[in-house]
Image (cartoon, helix red, strand yellow):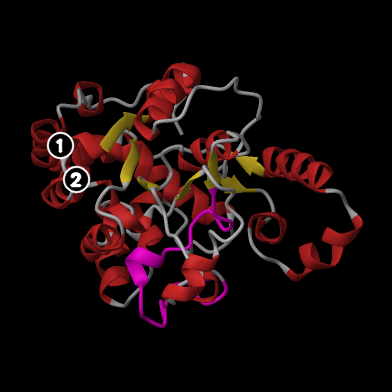
Amino acid sequence: MLGPQFLIIGAARSGTTALYQYLAEHPGLFLTEPKEPHYFALAGTTPAFTGPGDRQTINRLAVTDREAYLRLYADARPGQARGEASVSTMYYPAAVSRVREMNPEARLVCVLRDPVDRAFSAYGFMRTRGWEPCGTFEEALADEPRRIAEGWHHIWHYAAMSRYGEQLRHVLEVFPREQVLVLRHEDMTADPDAVLARVYDHLGVPPVPRTVAPDPHRSGEPRSRFLGRVVSTHHPLKKLLSPLVPLALRRRLRRQIVARNIVRTSYRPETRRELVATSGPDLDLLERVTGLDVAAWRAPERASGRG
């Protein structure tokens, strides 16, 4: 059985779902279902994360057995490049070493987002799903050290997961720079075709027209926490309805329900100033190890329209 030849390794809440959906329609590429097996981060373990919803989500869904993980690629056709998109791979230090052990020629792709916006989007994502107990972003940030110490899984590490410099320094100690493509979320939003052309070139496949309408995981404050949990998690009601409703219709209904159920929120201006100040050294490191221009992420004021 053959494993991956490429991986989308992060960052969470930075456009990896849209990129996964774009790549999945390329006839020369095969991507696993689920999108995020989390194998390289959690290989050989029995996940026992303790945060709200962790038992129903990552603890149940992570694929941590090697043979089970390799079986995810069993349906790949000859000639297809095989890959997956676990955002945990960039965050857990041991993960990229496991990738290299399995395939030292693997091509890695990461999409990075303004660190504060990414952290806030992760907070909103968990509020949307009905798991985040804190009513404000600031309260959640203050509670983050306790959550990490008590074993809540990585999606809850709002500030820590935004320290890309630390993460990519380690990735580039394991893999040569030419095997790692680093992208910015804002570039993919502004011109997805140009970014996809770079990804296809990195993966060694010819470009194809983009036809898919990505269905990313939206974030915000839910009007109904129950409805948010039904549409955003593996709720029993969805299992009952799935055989009765075609997939395309389910996806369209989900987008409509989520859009109507979410209220966009923000955070205090001083929160961004504080987080930008503390992230400065890590952004210096990120620019040094990758050459990426992240000057806009240092802005102490939040640009309108971000969320």
Which residue in the structure is indicated by mark 1? 286
Residue 33 visible, this orientation: yes
* Residue 24 left/right relative to 256: left
* Residue 37 left/right relative to 211: left
The structure residue drawn at horizontal position 30% and vertical position 56%, both measured from the top left corner, is 103
- Front position in the image: 102 or 216: 102
- Is the stretch drawn in magenta largely helix, strand or loop? loop
**Amino acid carrying mark 1 in the image:** Leu
Query: Residue 243: image x %, image y %?
Result: 87, 61
- Front position in the image: 268 or 55: 55
Which region is colored magenta? 31-56
As displayed, is residue 92 above or below residue 275?
Answer: below
Query: Residue 68: image x %, image y %?
Result: 51, 73
The structure residue drawn at horizontal position 42% and vertical position 63%, both measured from the top left corner, is 38
The crowd level at tag 2 (other Cα within 10 Å; few <14, some 14-19, many 20+) is many
Which residue in the structure is indicated by mark 2? 168
**Marks 1 and 2, how far apart at CA:** 7 Å
**Amino acid carrying mark 2 in the image:** Leu
Q: Quadrant of residue 24?
A: top right
Instruction: Compare marks 1 and 2 and give the one earlier in the sequence.
Output: 2
Residue 304 visible, this orientation: no
Q: Determine the residue located farthest toward the front in the rendered image.
A: 78
